[in-house]
Amino acid sequence: MRLFSCLLAAATAITSAVAYDIPDGASISVPWRHTGRPGFGWGNQKDKWGNKIEDDRRKITIRASEDDTDDISADFVWALEQAQNGGLVHLEEGKTYIIGKKIDLPVLNDVYVKLDGTLKFTDDVAYWQSNYFYYPFQKSITFMVWSGKDIRIYGKGTMDGNGQAWYNGFAGREILDSSNTYYRPILFLTDNATNVDVEGITFLNSPCWTTFLVRTKDVSFDNVYIEAFSNNASALPKNTDGFDSLNVDGLTVTNTRVNVGDDCFSPKPNTTNIYVENLWCNGTHGVSMGSIGQYPGVKDYISNAYLKNITLLNGQNGARLKAWAGPTAGYGYIDNITYENVHIENTDAPIVLDQCYFNINETTCAAYPSNVNITNIKFINFTGSSSGKDGRVVADLTCSPGATCSEILLEGINLTSPNGTAEIVCNNIQGDIGVDCISAADADD
């Protein structure tokens, strides 16, 4: 009895000390796991990183927002701080949590975020265009930055970018125009992060790219859904890519669906060790490697990617490699990329090597060709049909005269065109590509 009284007194003192700093409506609960002696000890089940699983973690909850202007950003930061080193923040089902301020998230260590409700950003365009985190690559901004190690974000909830106001304001503009100052936030961005798992959640209506992974190692997405839609036919979502990356080693995407108006999957400079399986894309610009070679004097690369069981519907491109040309372009390489088991329907360019990326006209591209080498690329088991927009051409592999394109293989290509017998174009490719091909000059338009 004396021992029990001492333990109860100690627990009460700790609870009182912690409660003093707890925001209104928040709570912290600590699990007691049984390991043979009732009331004592912790469980020993671990996640894939060797950290405690959900049931062994202290759980932090915060109050939900009362309406779309009720900002809980300070509470959210507090919750993440309490979850450091083995805790879990639970955003509960049926509740909405509004982020209306630029906030510095703590550098996380072994933190779970169970997102069953909705984490939603305000659409105060004027505020966010003055308060953001900035990245010079393509003038990118974001609401918040996730950094640290052993971070798991999972559940059945939604991260909502509230993008309609941004779609309306950006109508008629282009992200890469030098005069563009209408910056739009990226919904989910990691930087200086290691071992990040995202599972089960929905990313909805990002104002710009949906995810951007920067200086990150070993990041994975499983069973996520990405969608961007507009209720204004004259202001559709633009640049709402599913996945973008910069300086990333280890990027995995599995069992995922993407329904956006731009790239479905598009690793950018210095991304390596990529694995994609069971990816479904509708209305997108394709599953791309790049773009790279944008900035003068800068070497970019993408290497070691294996992508299989891909479905691409109603899009602009299917499997695409893209690099910049022009007087200010950089240089680099794309190497060791395999696309396997890809099904394509109603897609303008099912297979394309684009080395005159982003509206570079033919004259400029010829005068200042791309200096990005394309090597060791395999396209294996492609089925389905093009839209017919490019005539009978279902694959266009036109290599830049300023680059080397070698060890490119097409195998099991069963793509059709509604305009007649399918054609495959190849220009300036070194060696046999595994199928019959014709020059662009001989292709049917």
Image: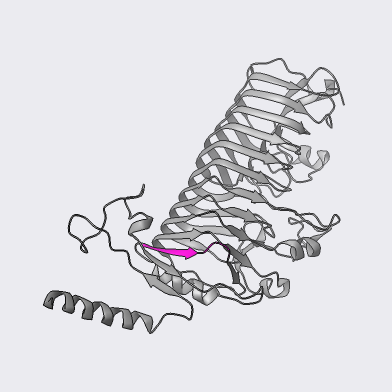
Quadrant containing the N terminus in the rendered view? bottom left
The residue nearer to you, when weighing 410 against 113, is: 113
Residue for point 71% across, 64% down? 183
- Residue 292 seen anywhere in this rendered image of the structure: no
The residue nearer to you, when weighing 234 against 95, is: 95
Q: Give the left or right position of residue 15, taking residue 412 as reference.
A: left
The residue nearer to you, when weighing 312 against 410, is: 312
Residue 348 magenta: no
Give the percent coordinates (x, y) of residue 274.
51, 39
Q: Which colour scheme is used?
A: one colour
Give the image quarter of residue 383.
top right
Q: Give the left or right position of residue 437, taking residue 16 as reference.
A: right
Q: In this view, does 276 lie above or below 69?
A: above
Callout count:
0
Q: Is residue 330 above or below residue 129?
A: above
Residue 92 magenta: yes
Q: Give the range drawn in magenta.
A: 87-94
Quadrant containing the C terminus in the rendered view? top right
Q: Which residue lies furthest to the left in this view?
A: 2
Residue for point 74% across, 40% down? 356
Q: Main secondary structure of the magenta part?
A: strand
Give the image quarter of residue 223.
top right
- Residue 13 seen anywhere in this rendered image of the structure: yes
Give the percent coordinates (x, y) of residue 359.
79, 45
Give the percent coordinates (x, y) of residue 170.
79, 61
